[in-house]
Image: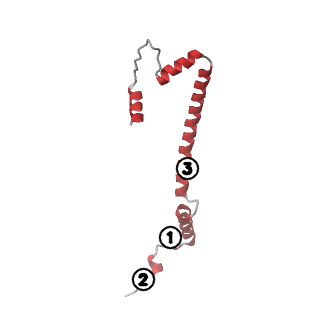
């Protein structure tokens, strides 16, 4: 009864020093290195999320700047803004608020 040693049980292609070196390199790059591919992927996802947030805030700043310029142009625009945003009215007026379903959901989320 012949006993097989450990090197005989390992497939021949894994005993090749080049294949073994490549496998060790891949394991190192994928898991062990401080800049491994897994953390790199997470960082790229985070970067994409932050860029989207930056674009959102740039658009918001532009929109708010436009509104501010509009408010500074005259009293008619200021009155319009007060009526729309703060629901102000003159003493002899009635105020009716019509919301779209989307605005209604947004308002209900803010109130809860």
* Quadrant showing the C terminus: top left
Q: CA distance from mark 2 to mark 1?
A: 18 Å
- What residue sits 41% from the left and 17% below the top? 95
- In this rendering, is residue 83 above or below 26? above
Considering the numbered disc 2 on the image, is that residue within a helix, a strand or a loop? Answer: loop
Q: Earlier in the sequence, mark 1 or mark 3?
A: 1
Q: Earlier in the sequence, mark 2 or mark 1?
A: 2
Name the residue tied to disc 3: 44
Q: Earlier in the sequence, mark 3 or mark 2?
A: 2
The image position of residue 58, as x and y in percent, is 59, 35
- What residue sits 54% from the left and 48% below the top? 46
The image position of residue 19, as x and y in percent, is 54, 68
- What residue sits 47% from the left and 20% below the top? 88
Crowding around mark 1 (Cα neighbors within 10 Å: few <14, some 14 to 19, many 20+) is: few
Q: Which mark is residue 13?
A: 1
Q: CA distance from mark 1 to mark 3?
A: 35 Å
> What is the quadrant of residue 92 in the picture?
top left
Name the residue tied to disc 2: 4
The image position of residue 10, as x and y in percent, is 46, 75
Considering the numbered disc 3 on the image, is that residue within a helix, a strand or a loop? Answer: helix
**Considering depth in this image, is 106 or 8 the residue closer to the camera?**
106
């Amino acid at each position: 009864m012949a006993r097989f040693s450990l090197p005989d049980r390992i497939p021949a292609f894994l005993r090749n020093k080049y294949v073994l070196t490549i496998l060790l390199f891949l394991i190192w790059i994928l898991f062990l290195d401080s800049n491994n591919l897994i953390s790199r992927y997470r960082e790229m996802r985070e970067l994409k999320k932050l860029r989207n947030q930056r674009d959102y805030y740039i658009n918001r700043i532009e929109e708010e700047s436009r509104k501010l310029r509009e408010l500074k142009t005259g009293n008619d625009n200021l009155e319009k803004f007060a009526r729309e945003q703060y629901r102000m009215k003159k003493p002899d007026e009635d105020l009716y608020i019509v919301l779209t379903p989307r605005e209604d959901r947004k308002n209900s989320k803010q109130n809860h």
